[in-house]
Every structure is written in C-alpha cells, then in structure tokens.
Image: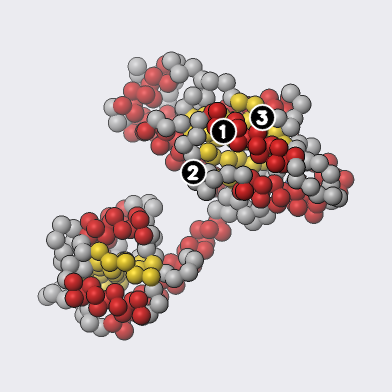
Amino acid sequence: MVGKAHVLVVDDDPDKLALLEFALTTAGYDVRTAGDGEEALAAVSSFQPDLVVSDIMMPRMNGYELARRIRENPQTRFIPVILQTAAGYRAEDQRYGSEVGALGFISDPTDIDLLLARASTLLDFKAYLDTCEEEASTDHLTGLANRRRFERQLEREVVRTLRYGHPFCLIMMDIDHFKQVNDNYGHAAGDQVLRLIGKTLQEGTRGIDLAARIGGEEFAIIFTETDLVGALEVAERLRLAINAIEIPAVGPIAASFGVAECPSSAQTTRELLASADAALYEAKRQGRDRVIQAPAADLNSAAATYVRKAVVSGDTQRVSDFRLGNSISEPDV
Ligand code: GH3
Ligand code: MG
Ligand code: MG
C-alpha cells in the first residue's frame, strides 16, 4: 500500500462510529465510515480499504453478511475484517464470525487498545500480501506487467466484451533482430534496450491500458475500450517512438506489431492471442518495422453464433467453455 493504510469503519450507531473513526484516524490511518453493510460494500469497491472494522448488528446488511460478501468476491477476499459487537455477545457469535471469514472478533468496542493492536497486525499482513502480489505480477527488468498479470487481464477483457459488446484490442510486439543487439553489443546493452522499450510503451499508453513483457523480447498491450482503428493508430505511434529511441552504443532499433480486435478478429482468449500473433508474424514476413492488423473473423460462423446465443441466454458455462476453447466442435445452434 502506498501512503496511509485505508480503514473502513462500519456501524449504525453514530456515537460508536465517531469514536472508532477518531481512534483510528489518531492512530494514523486514512479512515472512511459507513452506516450499514450495504453502504460498506459500496465503499469497499470505491475506497479499497486495507482493513474493515464492522459492527455485527446493523439494519439492511449485518456484519456477518458483509464479511461473507467481502470474502466471496475474488477482488476483495484478502481484505481483513474485524467484527465488533457490544450487544449480548455469545461464544457462537465468535465462531460464526470466523466461519464467515472475519479475522478478528472484539466483544468490547470500548477497548480501543485491543482494536488498534489487532488492526496493526492485520494491516502488516495485508501490506506484505500486497507487496507479494505486486512482485508476482511485475516484470523486474522493465517494470511492466508480466505474463501472469497480462493473461488475467486479457481473460477479464474478453469476458467484459462478450457481456457488454464493447470492443478492445490486443497488440503483440516483438523487437526486430534483437539477437544481433546481444551478439554485437553484449547482454547488458540488450537489457538496456528492453528497459527503454518498456518505458516507451508505458509512456505511450493510457493508465487503463496494460503494457506487459510476456517473453524475452516480446511485449503485449491490452487496449481497453478501443476499436481497431484506434489501436492501429497507437501501434503506429509506438513503432515510431521505438524508432526514435537513441542508444548511441547500439544504433537504431525497431519492432514489429500485430493488432487484433475482440470480438471482430476473435472471441476467445486463445484465438485472440493466435490472431494477434499471426499478424505479428506477417509483419515480420513483410520485412519487419511495421504494424499489421489481423483479418476479421467470420462473425457468422456457427461457433460465433453459438457464443452469441450462450451470452444472450446467460449460459455462463458455455461461454466459459467457448472462451477456453473447449467443446465447441458441435455447436448447438
Ligand atoms: P526477429 O526480428 O525475427 O524477431 O529476430 P530476433 O533476433 O529479435 O529474434 P530471436 O527470437 O532470434 O532472438 C531473440 C533474442 O532475444 C534472443 C535472446 O538472446 C534475446 N533475449 C531474450 N530475453 C532477453 C533478456 O532478458 N535480455 C537480453 N539482453 N536479451 C534477451
Ligand atoms: Mg525479435
Ligand atoms: Mg521473439
């Protein structure tokens, strides 16, 4: 986490809420408050807390249900939750709290020292988890996303496009004659080229796009909410920016690009990758240092009709099978 840890405090009793807010703010945390579980769930996605401290008995949605919902969402499941209650506490309340995933249970909400000690430990674990997650999905040479993060994001974008119909684009990029850079100027010079290209891709894309290093000298960029025309423009701009990189010891460098659009070029993760890869290969074949777009897929094919019907009927199993490239040999259309 960068800066102060975010703590969300949830309570329907305004006095208790104010007390906890004051105590946690004084302890140095960035605190947000919510009056019940439903309000808290909305704040969980907008405020992205590192810790939730919640009362149990509340109108609309109680603390158990809030903890359960936080745990069941893959995006929020590792946000620790502390439950606290003043009213008639029983042993089974604590057991139930643990069953729904709460990591702390405080039966005396006036014991601020206990709360702060528990909060501090859980926030320490959360910060370490965040660091691990960040390291596990970052390419250390360039600082870009690595293949792991790229594949996850690609899967999400395909799901989103199948659900809402907004196109997005995938660009695959490979440095031209990169082996010669290593052979002629050494591996350290090669690494410097990779770092500079990473920087160029980062600076040439928007914050919502994802630039990744997915192999030795292969990069990929996911352009969210962008159609083929837009992505081709950016790819061309990036190609020129790479041409303009100056490394005196190495001389000019260039790269080839393949651009595919979902859903027009392909409608599954695997096919989209294959489609952008084929376009990249074609760019190499045509002489390198160029951008080539993937051809449009046949949107009236039996398989395309199959996935459209599955999406319209909300048949997520079929959509998922299709995305993964499973069992589409006999589309039921
Ligand atoms: P093409 O234009 O066809 O892509 O030719 P190329 O030489 O770029 O392609 P090839 O696949 O033959 O060579 C890729 C080279 O990338 C080989 C390898 O030494 C280099 N490479 C891969 N990973 C790294 C790395 O982390 N650092 C450095 N310095 N070089 C790397
Ligand atoms: Mg290459
Ligand atoms: Mg290569």
Indicate which disc residue 291 carries.
3
In this picture, is 29 found above or below 47? below
Query: Mark 3 or 1 closer to N-term?
Result: 1
Q: Are marks 2 and 3 in contact (CB under 8 Å)?
A: no
Residue at the image position 60 percent from the left and 30 percent from the top: 232
Q: Would you name the residue on which mark 2 appears? A: 153
Kind of residue at badge 3 = Val
Distance of label 2 from label 3 (alpha carbons): 23 Å
- Mark 1, secondary structure of its residue: helix
Image point (50%, 26%), residue name: 266
Is 282 located above or below residue 39 in the figure? above
User: Is any part of residue 230 visible from this angle?
Assistant: yes
The answer to whether 90 is drawn above or below residue 327 in the figure is below
For disc 1, does the CB lie below 8 Å from ligand 2?
A: no
- Residue located beneath label 1 in the image: 231
> Which amino acid is tagged 1?
Ala
Residue sitting at 31 percent across and 30 percent down?
315
Q: Residue at x 21, y 68 (%)?
A: 11
Mark 2: secondary structure: helix
Callout 3 secondary element = strand
User: From the viewer's perspective, is 287 left or right of 92?
Assistant: right
Mark positioned earlier in the residue sequence (1 or 2)? 2
Q: How many marks?
A: 3
Disc number for residue 50: none
Evaluate whether residue 321 shows in this view.
no
Disc 2 crowd, CA 10 A, few/some/many (<14, 14-19, 20+):
some
